[in-house]
Image (spheres, helix red, strand yellow):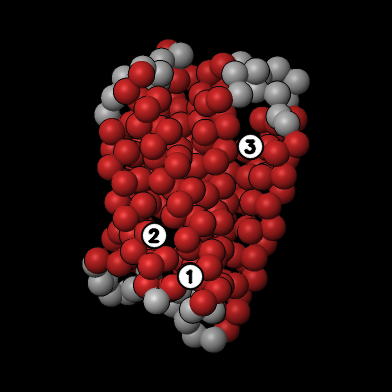
Amino acid sequence: MIATLLLICHIAAGVVALAAAMAALFTFKGGSKHRLAGRIYALAMTVVFVTAVPLAIIVSNLFLLIIATFSFYLVFTGWRFARNASGNPHWIDWTAVSILGLTALAMGGYAVVAAAAGDAQWVTTALFGAIALGLGVADFQFHLAPAKPATKRIMRHLTNMLGGTIATITAVLVVNVHTNPVWLAWILPTIVLTPLIVWWNFRIASTGEAR
């Protein structure tokens, strides 16, 4: 019964998060509608994470726990980059990026074990681990940088928020679509949407606009 209730809350929050993510994506960046959609998205993803942790423990699914932690990091830090106008990191920012580093290492270890066992899921875990490590290094370098231009901060905000959106879409796709090989559904949103992140960062860097 507890697992069922958690699952219902988890799915409902995921649906809200996906709708809010789409609203934030297609509204004027920095405008009131964008900020409202962002808040709803962050809150919904928090519920997704809070329900995913006990679900992962109940079903003894370490992979689910790792992915949930990674996804929540992206949303949390994306929100922090938007809220912290100075860009100067606080203890919570250092704690978050440290947890991501440990999560990336856990993904790497899980991928090795899965590959040795002949589990095709090692492809997904290895890819997500590499992405987690890359994003963690980028955030760490931003925190260390003495100067933190607003454009750089917004680039980190959009990168992490869109990364969280990819995670949300991935979850919906994995649950509702069966692919062969099975890991294709896990990596397809990353392959399709990563160019959008690259384009958006290029636009901000060259024009200073995030519209």
Q: Is residue 85 above or below residue 187?
A: above
Answer left or right for 28 relative to 110: left
Which residue corresponds to mark 1? 55
Corner quadrant of residue 25: top left
Q: Is residue 148 above or below residue 56?
A: above
Q: Are marks 2 and 1 in contact (CB under 8 Å)?
A: yes
* Outermost residue toward the front in this view: 1
Which residue corresponds to mark 3? 139
Q: Position of residue 17 (x, y in %)?
A: 35, 45
The amino acid marked with disc number 1 is Leu
SS of the residue under disc 2: helix
Is residue 131 at all visible to an observer of this figure? no
Residue 37, numbered label: none
Dividing the image into 4 quarters, which one contains the N terminus?
A: bottom left
Q: Is residue 86 above or below residue 13?
A: above
Q: Pointer 1: residues within 10 angstroms few (<14), some, or many (20+)?
A: many
Q: Position of residue 141 (x, y in %)?
A: 69, 34
Answer left or right for 22 relative to 183: left
Query: Residue at the spot x=34%, y=39% of the render?
Result: 21
Distance of mark 1 from mark 3, alpha carbons?
29 Å
The amino acid marked with disc number 2 is His
Q: Pointer 3: residues within 10 angstroms few (<14), some, or many (20+)?
A: many
Dividing the image into 4 quarters, which one contains the C terminus?
A: top left
Query: Residue at the spot x=24%, y=66% of the render?
Result: 176
Distance of mark 2 from mark 1, alpha carbons?
9 Å
Q: Position of residue 57 (x, y in %)?
A: 55, 73
Which residue corresponds to mark 2? 10
* Outermost residue toward the left in this view: 177
Q: In terms of depth relative to the viewer, which is nearer, 55 or 140?
A: 55
SS of the residue under disc 3: helix
The amino acid marked with disc number 3 is Asp
Which is nearer the N-term, disc 2 or disc 1? 2
